[in-house]
Amino acid sequence: MKRGRRAFMRHTAIGAGSLSLALVLPACARGRDDAGAPAGAPLKPNAWVEVVPQGRVRFVCGGTEMGQGSATGLAMLLCEELELPLSALDLAIAPADRAYDHAEYRLQTTGGSSSIRSEFVVISRAGASVRELFRAAAARRWGVPPEQVAIRDGRFVGPASGAPLTYGELVGDARGLP
C-alpha cells in the first residue's frame, strides 16, 4: 500500500486531535513554606522574589523570554521597585504553578506581546512589598521608624551609626515579619 504525505498528515491530524491529557502535581511544583525554613535558607516573600542570605536577589519570571525583552523588562521593573541595580538580580524562569498565570489569559503562558502591559502591576506590587518588608526589617534592627531608612543601590541606609545593609544581610530579620 502506497503511503504518501497526505495519508501521513491525515492520520497524524486524526491521532493528534483525538486525545489530550494533562497532569498537574501542585505539591511537586511548590517550594516549602518559608515559616519552617532553616535560618540559612532563602527567603521567598512572594512567588516572584527570592532573597538568599548573604547573597543575591532572584527574580522568578512567570513567562519565558521569546526575543521581545519581556523577561528583561519585568526584571528592570522589579529592580526599580527594589531600588536594586539590574546587575545584582538573578533571573529564573518559573516552574509550573498557578501563581505565575498570565494576568489576562489566566494561564501560565508566554505570547501575544503582552507580558509587560499585563504583568506591570503584579510585578510592581511584588517588588514594592518586598522592599517595604526589608525596610521594616532594617528599621527594626536599628530601632528607628521605617521612614528613616533609605535605599541606595540595593543597600539600606539608616542612622549614621549603622553600616549599610543588603537584602541578603536582612533575610533573618525579615523572616519574622508579616
Image: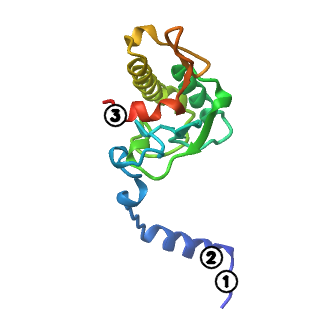
- Residue 3 is labelled as 1
- Residue 176 is labelled as 3
In the rendered structure, the answer to whether residue 12 lies left or right of residue 42 reads right
Residue 101 x %, y %: 42, 42
Residue 98 x %, y %: 38, 47
Q: For the residues marked 3 and 2, what is the alpha-carbon distance in whole angstroms?
A: 61 Å
Is residue 94 in view? yes
**Tags 2 and 1 touching, CB below 8 Å:** yes
Task: Name the front one of labels 3 and 1.
Answer: 3
Q: Quadrant of the N terminus?
A: bottom right
Secondary element type, mark 3: loop
Residue 136 x %, y %: 39, 20
Residue that numbered label 2 is attached to: 8
Q: Residue at x 50, y 69 (%)?
A: 16
Q: For the residues marked 3 and 1, what is the alpha-carbon distance in whole angstroms?
A: 68 Å
For the residue pair 10 and 121, the one nearer the viewer reads as 121
